[in-house]
Image (cartoon, rainbow, N blue to C red):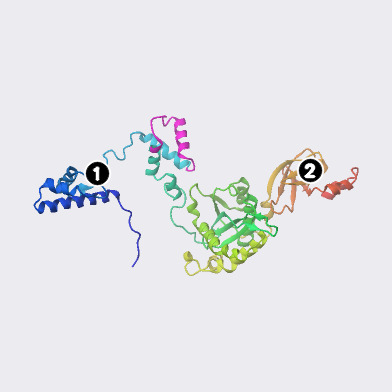
Amino acid sequence: MKNFPSAAEDPRASRALGRFAAVQMVVQGVQNGLSMVHAAEQAAQQPWDGRYFSAQTIEDWYYAYRKGQFAALQDQPRADRGKHKTLDPAAVEALLKLRRDHPQLTVKALIGELVRQGVLQPGSFSDSTVQRRLAEAGLDRQSLRAGAGLVAGPTKAFEVPLPNLLWMADCMYGPTLKSGDETTQRTYLFALLDDCSRLCVHGQFYGHERLEYFLDTLRRALQTRGLPDKLYTDNGAAFRSQHLGIVCANLGIRLLHAKPYHAWSKGKIERFFSTVQTQFLPPLVFTPVHSVEELNQRFWQWLETDYHQRTHTALGAESPAQRFARLGTSLRLLAANAPLDRLFFMRVNRRVRKDATFSLGADLWEVATHLRGQLITVRFDPVSCARMEVWLGERFIGLAVRCDKHRNAKIHIVTNDYDREIY
């Protein structure tokens, strides 16, 4: 037999039951020969629903019950319930529209904007009134976090029919690593999950939560699992960038962002992170790792030998690896000669200094001397920095090299070998 959660108690019904019990005591007293006054006074000597009431009040309940039975003992809703005197319908409509358009704003900010627009007049309403109107429409903060009130976004459980139709991306805090010299390093896990198979197409720990590391995760996933039709992310700084949009556009991937307060719409990857936290991370307490590289090796081994091979509740009798292999027969793959690495290159503008160098991050890079004073575009892999391309507009000039001041001191300033060595 199934166990169902008990229903929430209605305070109005509880009060009505207390009144009914008092009326029944009066009825019994009258039947035993007491007068109505004495029966009501006797009932007033004890509490009903936790409170004491006067004999007159209990007598009124008695006559109300005789007239309308149990329903007459229940509190009746106010006649003006649902009619808001302090906010006219136009103001309520403007408030709800503004909330739907900007769900991340606080109530104070919403009020301030409506006052600025002239929709609300200062002193003619209270903050609690605004809060009640939002709560009634399911647009208060608690309802929004639970996924109510906003129509946009997936409002029902969903699953795409084939692998690589939809990938979900997110980032979670990883373990803090402690090295041999007792220094600590915080880690972050970027992961991409295939919606159809629940397969983690790629996941990797990094030392920072930045765009370049998510791009590295995405590039590795594309190389091993093919191209998705859609990429669904939240609104974190690592996912909301023009550069990511350009990368996806060049690859024919539709980039989608979750609406604010719609974290529930990425429930599958949130569930994956929960699995990582409860199954992968705990054993690290007993066999700790001391570097990000070692952590990733352990994580990838767990993915391939454990998570991907284990049957998933939502997949029936299949594991993520089995479903991806069975249904992934027509994946969109990268062309053999596709310049994937260069598609992911980040682009920044730099002014070349008089000594033919420019700075990028914490490093100094050298270019040809004829570029001194010019504004160049640097295209590079932000993770490895193995290739640093120098462009003037849309024209490729050459590669920049790390500045070696000691080497430069040995090169005679009159020679022109230096420029030729760079290119």
Local secondary structure at mark 1: loop
Of callouts 1 and 2, the N-terminal one: 1
- Foreground mark, 1 or 2, reads 1
Residue 115 lies, in percent from the top left, at: 44, 31
Residue 265 lies, in percent from the top left, at: 48, 53
Residue 63 lies, in percent from the top left, at: 15, 46
Q: Is residue 56 visible?
A: yes
Magenta region: 103-128
The residue drawn where x is 58% and y is 53% is 253
Which label belongs to residue 111? none
Amino acid residing under circle 1: Gln
Would you identify the image quadrant in which residue 80 lies? top left
- Tell how many labels: 2
- Residue in front for this viewpoint, 114 or 326: 114
C-alpha separation, residue under disc 1 versus residue under disc 2: 81 Å
Say above or below: 112 vs 188: above
Residue placed farthest to the left in the image? 33
Would you identify the image quadrant in which residue 107 lies? top left
The residue drawn where x is 52% and y is 57% is 270
Which label belongs to residue 357? 2
Look at mark 1 in the image and give the residue it sits on.
76
Left or right of 158 on screen, residue 396: right
